[in-house]
Image (tube, rainbow, N blue to C red):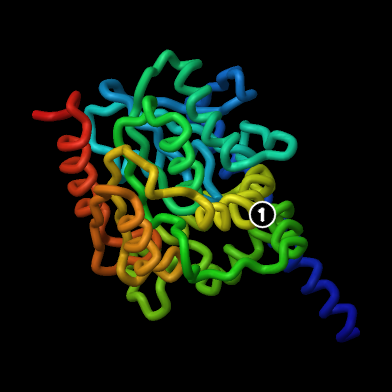
């Protein structure tokens, strides 16, 4: 009798969980469908992207766990008004397929292919976290196509703050929307380290909402899994082999002192290796620089005005 009642309770709980999961998945997919997504057929293959605004072009390249939607989100927080934002999905994210035997250099070339398809000769680039590697390669391989580089919470040579789990475990988790959904829905506090919230950092209700939204914005994670695995096990380590001292493009590096993922000390080292790079230190806020959006936006605006002649007042 007791066993039967317990089984019934378990079934009810599972049923309610599945109903919530399906509701959330519909909302995640509707969010993506609400974006004005485009697809370019380029010499480097199919590339999904979105664009907004007008003016001088800025290529906004998302980090690990992103996609065109994350790129647009970063642009709304950090890119000054009056600029034209082009936000692509990188290899293995959403509508951009992962090529066979993909390399960081291939991804760098894909940025040039996208600019070609859009008829853009030269652009500034903003990127965050994992895909600093491909953007620095783009500046090395196509220096004539990039006017300025902004590296936010950058993946950098040297010590790392977050050690990757075994690749088979990580890949299996990412290819299951349900597993990831359970983790962010019922173990959200424990997942905050995945988006770089420092231990002991005091989250206001507003900042907690930002963190929760960021964790959920990775969904559907299965549509980003190939890119996330590539970022983690191929792209991130490749920064150690990048000849950063050969970059000639004006560069701004922005890093929070308490970033637990891409360490502040490593970001300073990155800036020191790039000739003439400027370094902007943010007091706290971790990998997402929580609470400092206005400060970061202002630093980017000042840098772009000085680095890109077309934007000089």
Work out whether residue 226 or residue 42 is closer to the camera in this orientation and state it.
42
Quadrant of residue 284 in the image?
bottom left
Residue beneath the point at 27% across and 61% down: 291
Residue beneath the point at 31% across and 38% down: 249
Q: Residue furthest top?
A: 119
Q: Residue furthest left?
A: 313
Q: Is 276 left or right of 149, judged from the image as shown? A: left
**In x, y percent, where is residue 220?**
63, 46
**In x, y percent, where is residue 127?**
41, 44
**Which quadrant, please, contains the C terminus?**
top left
Q: Secondary structure at mark 1?
A: helix
**In x, y percent, where is residue 201?**
35, 75
Q: Is 195 left or right of 106, judged from the image as shown? A: left
Residue wearing tag 1 = 21
Residue beneath the point at 46% across and 48% down: 243
**In x, y percent, where is residue 58?**
34, 31
Query: Can residue 246 be seen in this snapshot?
Result: yes
**Which quadrant, please, contains the N terminus?**
bottom right
The relative height of residue 161 versus residue 180 in the rendered view (above or below) is below
Residue beneath the point at 41% across and 55% down: 154
């Amino acid at each position: 009798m007791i066993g039967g009642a317990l089984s019934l309770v378990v079934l009810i709980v599972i049923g309610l969980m599945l109903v919530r999961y399906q509701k959330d998945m519909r909302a995640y997919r509707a969010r993506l469908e609400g974006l004005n997504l485009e697809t370019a057929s380029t010499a480097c293959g199919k590339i999904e992207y979105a664009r907004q605004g007008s003016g001088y072009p800025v290529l906004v390249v998302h980090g690990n766990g992103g996609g065109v939607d994350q790129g647009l989100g970063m642009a709304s927080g950090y890119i000054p008004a009056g600029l034209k934002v082009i936000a692509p999905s990188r290899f293995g994210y959403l509508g951009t397929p992962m090529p066979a035997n993909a390399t960081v250099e291939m991804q760098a070339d894909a940025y040039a292919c996208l600019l070609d398809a859009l008829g853009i000769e030269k652009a500034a680039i903003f990127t965050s976290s994992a895909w600093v590697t491909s953007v620095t390669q783009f500046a090395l391989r196509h220096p004539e196509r990039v006017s300025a580089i902004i590296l936010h919470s950058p993946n950098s040579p040297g010590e790392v703050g977050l050690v990757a789990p075994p690749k088979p475990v990580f890949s299996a988790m990412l290819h299951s929307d349900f597993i990831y959904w359970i983790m962010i829905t019922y173990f959200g506090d424990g997942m905050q380290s995945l988006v770089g919230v420092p231990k002991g950092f005091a989250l206001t209700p507003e900042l907690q909402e930002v963190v929760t939204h960021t964790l959920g914005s990775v969904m559907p994670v299965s549509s980003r899994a190939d890119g996330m695995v590539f970022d983690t096990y191929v792209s991130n380590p490749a920064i150690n082999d990048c000849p950063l001292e050969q970059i000639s493009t004006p560069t701004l590096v922005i890093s929070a002192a308490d970033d637990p993922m891409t360490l502040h000390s490593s970001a300073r080292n990155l800036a020191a290796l790039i000739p003439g790079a400027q370094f902007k230190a943010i007091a706290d806020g971790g990998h997402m620089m929580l609470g400092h959006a206005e400060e970061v936006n202002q630093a980017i605006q000042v840098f772009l005005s000085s680095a890109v002649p077309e934007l000089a007042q």
